[in-house]
Amino acid sequence: MRCDAVSEKLDAFRTGELGRSELEEITAHLASCGSCLQELADIQRIATRARGMRASAPEAIFERILMSIGDRYAELETDLGRMWVGFNARGITMVHPRAQEAKAFEDSYEKRIGRRPLRSAIPKSYARSLQRAAAGTLLSDTPVDLSSLSPFEQKVLLLLRRIPRGEVRPYAWLAREAGRPQAVRAVGNAMARNPIPFLLPCHRVVPTAGGIGNYAFGSALKRELLLREEAPVDEIEQLGRAGVRYVGCRSTNIYCFPTCHDARRMRPENRVPLRSVKEADAAGYRPCRHCKPLAVAF
Amino acid sequence: MKSAVVVENADNLAVAVHRNVDGAIDRLVELYQDALFSYALRLLQDRFDAQEVAQDALLRAIRALTARYDEERCRDLDLRPWLFRITRNLAYNWRRARRYSAEVPLTEANDGPGQSFRSQRAAERTLDDLEQQASMQMALDRLSPGVRDLILLRFMEEMSYSEIAAVVNSSESSVRGKVFRALRKLRKALEKMEDRNAM
């Protein structure tokens, strides 16, 4: 083989992209040709330098690509078992206990949210919030995306975050706070259809008549969640059976929902059980400004 | 080494992304983000543009694999050349757009050889390395854009000739010939620069 023929094939020789006979010919040629050997060394040097031109993508690129994909979902292990979690760049969109298969979750997601989610890793902050919510220790708000819901549903669901951990409020209170006191039934439906249970605490909403009430995933789970949040579940049930809806305070003349943190600070000797707003009015009590029991006066 | 992993997983990865297998998208992005970014960076000489292009390329790829392509097409896909082809097309479009836009003239590109090594890893490099880098970049700059592209694929990305042919939609022998002639120019240019440095 002559030098120019070898030269043309040196780079393919370098990477082993040649057939066997060519390989042998070039090996033989190189054994006796200093200039071709030098050329090969030069090519190798260029290759090394070119490899040095590789750069690392900016840190942000990974998350930005994943976030621009649109809706995604992942499986998450929590204290309440495994869950499916849907999310996008705006926040968490949907949470469901992992009773269903991946495909079934994708289907229900598409039906509910209107887009099909892709499976991918969940951002750490979302995972942490949900795990805390399941453990009953969530204190801060996490971004959620409710844009596929009606304005009323969005309003009601976001109001849930005003019910503090460890406390409960009646459906009627929520309806009133949402500006539609008559829409108690609609509020109930919104709770039942809450796409982000645990995180948007619909488990903190109870029947106006008392007790713990129903839950989309069974009242046992609702009870469990409230207990984890250190809500006085037994007391709520007892008061409900006794028809007590509010608690008044003799020393301050204020009445509260029984789980309001102000109510729980009252001295036992000052606590007055109240069955209705009328009864509270008659006794000269004013509604608490924190838990706003007046909302249920109608 | 990264490229070895790529080759191992490539045939299944496209199908895995198509089937929406847990973590497949994340793996795709993880495996290729650096390579596509490097390639775009050397084509465009601008970190911002390169990030946009690499990002867009991966997004388009994911959308195609998950929504547009059927499973058979995903299985037959040569993932790496395909991803580079998408990146290359986007980078060329980007460059064309930039050329016609008065706001961002090419001469103001913010990633000349002197500025491109801000990463931590780069800080550990010796001055000698940096000099070599700079001379390599300068030598590359003397090549025509089309040929420079081939050199990047061949030597920075270490692609085989058949892979490069798939990326640039050309024949293997044509790619070989172009690389051969480019190598000759590169060697001469580097030699000249080194002689000057030695004096």
Image: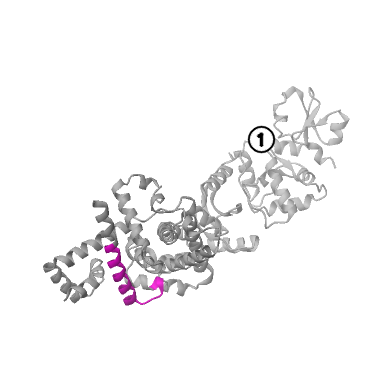
Q: Which residue is mark 1?
A: A232
Left or right, A190 with respect to A38, comes to right
Name the image quarter holding the C terminus of chain A. top right
How is colour applied across the structure in the image?
A: one colour
Q: Residues within 10 Å of mark 1 (few under 14, many from 20)?
A: some
Tell which of B97 and A102 is nearer to you: B97
Is residue B19 something that shows in the picture?
Answer: no
Residue B28, above or below B73: above
The stretch drawn in magenta includes residue B177: yes
Range of the magenta residues? B166-188
The secondary element bearing badge 1 is classed as loop
Considering the image in quadrants, where does the N terminus of chain A appear?
bottom left
- The residue located at (41%, 58%) in the rendering is B38
Q: Amino acid at mark 1?
A: Pro
Looking at the image, is B92 positioned above or below residue A193? below
Residue A159 belongs to magenta span: no
Q: Residue at coordinates 19% horizontally, 72% vertically from top-left?
A: A23
Q: Quadrant of residue A2?
A: bottom left
**Residue A205 shown left or right of residue A61 in the figure:** right
**Residue at 21% of width from left, 61% of height from top?**
A41
